[in-house]
Image: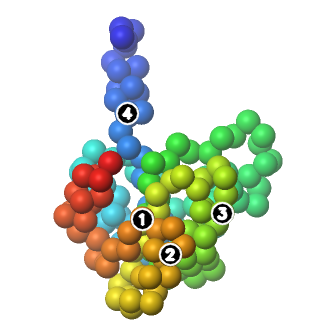
């Protein structure tokens, strides 16, 4: 494949990287996750709420306002469990109920090590449940599953 410019080549490389949507209301946790995924060659988009994540995925309330908008091409969603407004569990539920997004793997992260909570998320379709703080080894394990 011939590229007419370095910009086209860079865009092709960017498009080839897996894309993760990190959802967390805590700015520090969001930045840590962004840094960890970026250092593992992921393209990262962040959202500070479940509602914002759904909007990015074209599943929000105004999603049909622009009929040509197809949403982001997301390969993985990593969401905090405890968030105000819409919990990570509710986000997981909405993602898995939609025919447009149900195939996207979702990983729930939380500082709560409660077996019933973990089981509830896994039964609802979460690919994994990871305890905070997110570490580079967690991201490496996610990457090795692809």
Mark 3 or 2: the one toward you: 2
Tag 3 or tag 4, which sits nearer the N-term? Answer: 4
Q: Position of residue 140 (x, y in %)?
A: 22, 57
Mark toward the start of the polypeptide (3 vs 1): 3
Q: Which of the pair 54/93 is nearer the observer?
A: 93
Q: Which residue is mark 2?
A: 123
Question: In terms of sequence position, does the residue under pointer 3 or pointer 2 come before the other?
Answer: 3
The residue tagged 4 is: 16
Position of 74 with respect to 36 (left or right) is right
Q: Position of residue 130 (x, y in %)?
A: 33, 74
Q: Which residue is mark 1?
A: 127
Q: Is residue 64 visible?
A: yes
Question: Farthest front residue?
Answer: 123
| C-beta proximity under 8 Å, tags 3 and 1 | no
Q: How far is the residue under mark 4 from the one under mark 1?
A: 22 Å
- Determine the CA span between mark 1 and mark 2: 9 Å
Q: Is residue 105 left or right of residue 89?
A: left
Q: Residues within 10 Å of mark 4 (few under 14, many from 20)?
A: few
Disc number at residue 97?
3
Observer-nearest residue: 7 or 117?
117
Q: Is residue 51 above or below residue 68?
A: below
**Label 3, label 2: how far apart the Cα atoms are:** 13 Å
In primary-sequence order, the first of circles 4 and 1 is 4
Q: Nearer the viewer, residue 56 or 112?
A: 112
| Dot 1 crowding, Cα within 10 Å, few <14, some 14–19, many 20+ | some
């Amino acid at each position: 494949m011939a590229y007419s410019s370095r910009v086209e080549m860079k865009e092709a490389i960017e498009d080839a990287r897996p894309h993760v949507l990190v959802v967390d209301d805590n700015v520090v946790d969001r930045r840590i996750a962004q840094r960890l995924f970026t250092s593992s060659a992921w393209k990262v988009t962040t959202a500070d709420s479940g509602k914002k994540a759904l909007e990015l995925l074209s599943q929000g309330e105004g999603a049909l306002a622009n009929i040509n908008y197809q949403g982001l091409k997301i390969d993985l969603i990593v969401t905090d469990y405890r968030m105000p407004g819409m919990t990570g569990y509710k986000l997981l539920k909405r993602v898995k109920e939609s025919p447009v997004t149900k195939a996207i793997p979702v990983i729930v992260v939380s500082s709560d090590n409660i077996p019933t909570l973990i089981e509830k998320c896994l039964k609802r379709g979460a690919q994994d449940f990871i305890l905070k703080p997110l570490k580079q080894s967690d991201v490496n394990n996610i990457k090795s599953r692809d």
